[in-house]
Amino acid sequence: MKPRVLSGMRPTGALHLGHYHGALKNWVRLQDEHECFYFVADWHALTTHYDDHADLERNVYDMVVDWLAAGIDPDRATLFIQSRLPEHAELFTLLAMGTPLSWLERVPTYKDQMKALTGRDLATYGFLGYPLLQAADILIYKAAFVPVGEDQSPHVEITREVARRFNHLYGKGQTVLPEPATLLTETAKLPGLDGAKMSKSLGNDIAMREEPAEVERKVRRMPTDPDRVRRTDSGNPERCPVWRFHKLYSDVDTRAWVVKGCTTAGIGCLECKQPVIDAILREQQPWRERAETYLANPKHVHWIVEVGTERARTMARKTMREVRDAMGLNY
Ligand code: TRP
Ligand code: SF4
């Protein structure tokens, strides 16, 4: 039996290269050695954007298409949508009864997001409950591993505490809800075009399915070392966001060519950017091909999600029967 992995993403719409290199690439890789459950955390999207649901459905399916395009294999991984499984809400409710408020209030993302998302109403019960809903997502499938970025590891930590407390209160010496472990994704960080974190709202992203001409245009317009004003000025790659793309996309020889060419003004910035453009286009090619077949047949995508959701439901229902039994709610 392969160990079970579970992870979710909020449906932000079509994914960009930051999502791919930060998470999705790892999800694809994990399929070889693990039983993988990947889901669309659409309720989690509502915790911060409850009044902004107009594009939800499109965002959900755009994201699923990108998962499939990246190489998530529906024959090996179970793909599903959180809101189709009310069992998650039931477990969330039952866990909520015994979860101290202070555990949720002290989660670092709670205060951080309050500061970061200034335009949003985050003074809601749903937003405070975000990590507990995440705990329910994880525990209901008895996942052994949760692959997440570093920012999410406090949520897995609280999941472990919640499980421990549940087992202590209701388990009668048995482990009803196993504690999951974080599987930290160590990835080469890909910044946005301007060197800040890649994000669609900052307009510094390249979509996974960005048109080739757009990829070329965007990379050609990337800022470079600010001190390299003229072609004859030498530059310092460490001050240049293009260099960070080379670190991810280029081989040793190309990187040596960049360092030498940049520091001696031997190459121009457009010349330096060309291997990055080529590498991105090469990387996108198989995604484009796979996406095309799925986009030509949206019913197939719905079917994949349907099958995954029913597979998940079988497991979620089984856990809920055990949870209700343990809590004496089996009447
Ligand atoms: N909070 C996660 C994020 O924003 C998404 C998520 C929801 C999740 N439930 C989960 C991730 C369960 C892992 C496991 O990225
Ligand atoms: Fe950046 Fe390359 Fe220009 Fe140097 S030559 S400043 S690394 S784009």
Image (tube, helix red, strand yellow):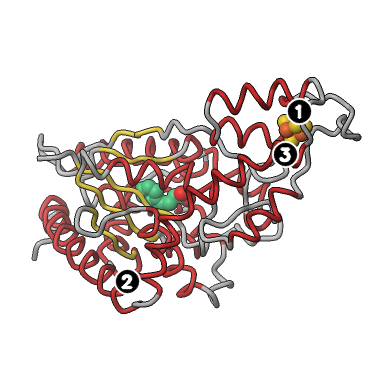
- What is the quadrant of residue 34 in the picture? top left
Q: Position of residue 62 (x, y in %)?
A: 46, 67
Q: Which mark is residue 301?
A: 2
Q: Is mark 3 within 8 Å of ligand 2?
A: yes
Q: Is mark 1 within 8 Å of ligand 2?
A: yes
Q: Position of residue 51 (x, y in %)?
A: 58, 72
Position of 191 relative to 79 (above/below): above
Name the residue tied to disc 1.
Answer: 239
Q: Position of residue 255 (x, y in %)?
A: 61, 26
Q: How many marks?
A: 3
Q: Earlier in the sequence, mark 3 or mark 2?
A: 3
Circle 1: residue type = Arg
Q: Earlier in the sequence, mark 1 or mark 2?
A: 1
**Local secondary structure at mark 2:** helix
- What is the quadrant of residue 271 in the picture? top right
* Left or right: 172 as drawn, with respect to 255: left
